Amino acid sequence: MTAAIEVLGVARQFRQSGGMLGTDRQIRAVDGVSFAVESGTCLGIVGESGCGKSTLARLILGLLPTSAGDILVEGQRLSDMDRKARARLIQPVFQDPFSSLNPRRRIRDIVAMPLQAQGITGRAQATRVDEMLSRVGLPGTIAERMPAQLSGGQRQRVAIARALVLRPRIVVCDEPTSALDVSVQAQILNLLAELQRELGLTYVFISHNLAVVEHISDRVAVMYLGRMVEQATTEALFAAPQHPYTRALLASVLTPEPGLGVPDVGLGDLYPDPANVPPGCRFHPRCPAAEARCAVETPAPREIDGRRVECLLA
């Protein structure tokens, strides 16, 4: 298989103002990340809030420039493409289907916007919009409504139709089901899987919900403080996680068994702070298995049985 996306040592830094009396801080939101996504597959990216997932999504979409490294889309440097060329190749589906749709425009006009930007108008535009609304499971009458007249699930179907109306080959989904009810989440996930099979799409699927990622992904990458600490096939990662952080994430998943309560995985309340990255292994302050060397040695990525792990103890 060929790679649809190659992320090569990508970093993105922000400067956070300290105000009139404070000191500016450097935020390393994404810090030297590398991975590839094969054509027609789905890479799931998981991690706690603030780990850099959404920043990475915006870098892949070309909405933010990189501070270092390169992103290749079907062999082309993303930074060399103009906006129209990027839009034809790669499109987003965002978390909140209401805020991502213009509340003052009809559904037909919302879905048609990417076509208008490419100069596709008239009958060709109307036909494409009608076809895409039907493909995502919406009746034709929806086209004349406003976003406020739709349910959350219908709005997310509209967002998916808008993302696919240009027939891109890659879709970046940033928490696309987290704002929906559980029953509607399943419908949207099944729709995304069906569209992937029918259209041969490549997905980058970002979520904090491990069950959702397990359901839809071929491979999973685990992020912590801007780094990919473990990458593996979905089956291998869920069956035998190698990084202590991955194990902690999986252990934190609630089970339906009554009386068990919320799992205590021993991570405490030292949540990741991208403005204050610890020396050595950046997970060591929270790691139950940390040794003295973990505080001073930075782990390099290692290939272990087909997976990539950044851990001195793996």
Image (cartoon, grey):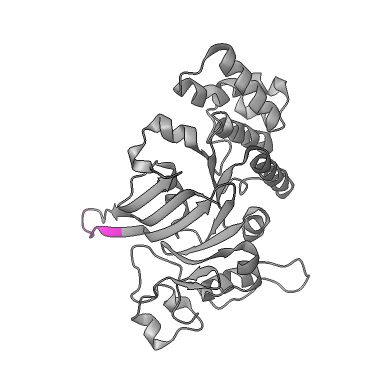
Q: Position of residue 74 (x, y in %)?
A: 46, 43
Q: Position of residue 280 (x, y in %)?
A: 35, 77
Check the image and report above or below for 76 versus 235: above
Residue furthest out toward the right: 258
15 or 161: nearer the viewer: 161
Residue furthest out toward the top: 122
**How many numbered marks does the figure carry?**
0
Q: Which residues are magenta?
A: 20-26
Q: Residue at x 61, y 28 (%)?
A: 147
**In this rendering, position of residue 241 left or right of residue 117:** right
Q: Would residue 21 be counted in the magenta stretch?
A: yes
171 or 181: nearer the viewer: 171
Residue furthest out toward the left: 21
Majority SS type along the magenta span:
loop
Q: Residue 279, located in which quarter of the rendered image? A: bottom left
Q: Residue at x 59, y 50 (%)?
A: 41
Q: Residue at x 39, y 49 (%)?
A: 71
Q: Residue 200, located in which quarter of the rendered image? A: top right
305 or 34: nearer the viewer: 305
Q: Residue 156, located in which quarter of the rendered image? A: top right
Q: Position of residue 95 (x, y in %)?
A: 55, 44
Q: Would residue 273 be counted in the magenta stretch?
A: no
**In this rendering, position of residue 302 left or right of residue 131:** left
Residue furthest out toward the bottom: 292
Q: From this viewpoint, is residue 145 visible?
A: no
Q: Position of residue 33 (x, y in %)?
A: 40, 59
193 or 302: nearer the viewer: 302
Check the image and report above or below for 71 versus 302: above
Q: From this viewpoint, is residue 199 visible?
A: yes
